[in-house]
Image (cartoon, rainbow, N blue to C red):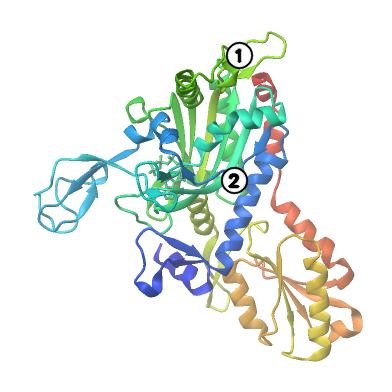
Amino acid sequence: MEELVALCKRRGFIFQSNEIYGGLQGLYDYGPLGVELKNNLKQSWWREMVFDRDDVEGLDASILTKPNVLKFSGHEDTFTDPLVDCRDCKSRWRADQLKSDKCPSCGSNNLTDPRPFNLMFKTSVGPVEDKDSFAYLRPETAQHIFTNFKNVVDSTSKQLPFGIAQIGKAFRNEITPRNFVFRVREFEQMELEFFVAPGTDEQWHESWVESRLSWWDEQGVSRKNLELYHVPEDELAHYSKATVDIMYKFPHGLEELEGIANRTDFDLGSHSKNQADLDIQSNVLENNESNARLATQDQETKKWTVPYVIEPSAGVDRGVLAVLNEAYKVEELDDGKTRTVLNLKPHLSPIKAAVIPLKKNHEGLVDTASNIKKDLQKLRLGRVLLENSGNIGKSYRRHDEIGTPLCITVDFETLEDKSVTVRDRNTMQQTRIEISKLSKYLEDMILKSVSYTHLRAHETPEHRGCR
Ligand code: ATP
């Protein structure tokens, strides 16, 4: 983990947040390369969840949340961790993560009994701070998917089964944030709420677990480093009938990367019921249950159903950590030296190609390199960099370390034969390629980076059988 953290800081992937004022625990900032990697991972998820399917719509909802939403979702009562204090050194710990009955900091066994600590951050909305201005920062993106359920159904005429996808920030006041970006207080989630007819939920749950495993594999997170954890009944969240966690071998141990829960009709049912109660109190509900109910109506039978929901919920920051950990390699070279390489899948690489003139500031070479950069950039496949360093060896080492799949060198021969040397990050092989063929070469490499196995997975007979 230390090597990865050092690389992230040195090369500009991830920095401690608020660092010049001493940092703020549990918060990290993504630097110039980190933001590209993170965006690429999110884009890959969005492409699979929304673009590649016709049964999922996207959403981008607010972070500030009215207390009623999180009251009726059950979070006010149950979104807690057990907190213990050390009476001697005043440190605080999560009781369920203590390995013994001693304080991990000072070794004292003078600990308080565990008490529930609610993880939700509170804030105030508007200029006057009073009981009506109080709001939460959302602890998961899911709730506003549920509260927007009727808006999405009414505006898209979706029929079951269908999903609503969202990527965005979530906030949890973790008692002990730790292990770099694994457990932080401000993070991003990629969540899909996939609504299905009751009775088909278990089959859909299984199918989503398979789809999510295959997606992680495509991001370079090898199946051999992933394990499924079927959460036992006494550990299930209050809304869940069954949860399967995808566990990854992080540098600090095997821990949750993504949770896939069968949330049943708990959330839609609870918001419907409470919405209906509120409407009845204020005489809004006029005998038309669909006014308030977060339900779908079958076009033929006209029957209203509160759907069940399967929720694959992945952490972006844990995803970035897993992808970096999988890609990070220190290789022995033939000459006895070593090289550090980030073997990232090209679609995730922060920089897709670096174009390097052999001689710094040489007009002809720099002009040619600059035109190549512009042409490749036009493909809109991601960032292509012009690197006027004049030190090819150093550039290769830097780009190996940040995961750039291709380095393109423009040399004096280029000016004669209109071809360049393309160096492959993984094999270190150098190939001479005509400039006119570079766009296709780069495009093929990025497209090959994603195998689209998930598209085939969606089309298995079992999958169709769920519909
Ligand atoms: P954990 O048991 O590790 O606290 P959780 O079961 O509470 O996680 P979920 O509520 O299922 O997590 O959230 C879905 C996903 O959001 C998790 O799989 C994880 O990837 C991510 N996540 C949750 N909490 C954090 C956090 N504090 N920091 C970073 N990512 C998080």
Q: Secondary structure at mark 1?
A: strand
Q: Secondary structure at mark 2?
A: helix
How far apart are the alpha carbons under marks 2 and 1?
Answer: 39 Å
Nearer the observer: mark 2 or 1; the answer is 1
Choose between 279 and 104: the one closer to the eye.
279
Q: Which amino acid is tagged 2?
A: Asp
Depicted 166 relative to depicted 269: above or below:
below
The residue wearing badge 2 is 217
Instruction: Tell me how many marks there are.
Output: 2
- Which residue appears at 72% of the width and 42% of the height? 51
Q: Is residue 143 left or right of residue 51?
A: left
Give the mark, 2 or 1, whose residue is nearer the N terminus: 2
Quadrant of picture, ligand 1: top left
- Which residue appears at 42% of the width and 67% of the height? 16
Q: Is residue 6 left or right of residue 335?
A: left
Choose between 5 and 262: the one closer to the eye.
262
- Which residue appears at 61% of the width and 35% of the height? 164
Please provide percent x and percent y for residue 88: 10, 56
Please provide percent x and percent y for residue 331: 54, 68
The residue wearing badge 1 is 304
Please provide percent x and percent y for residue 58: 65, 40
Return the mark for residue 103.
Answer: none
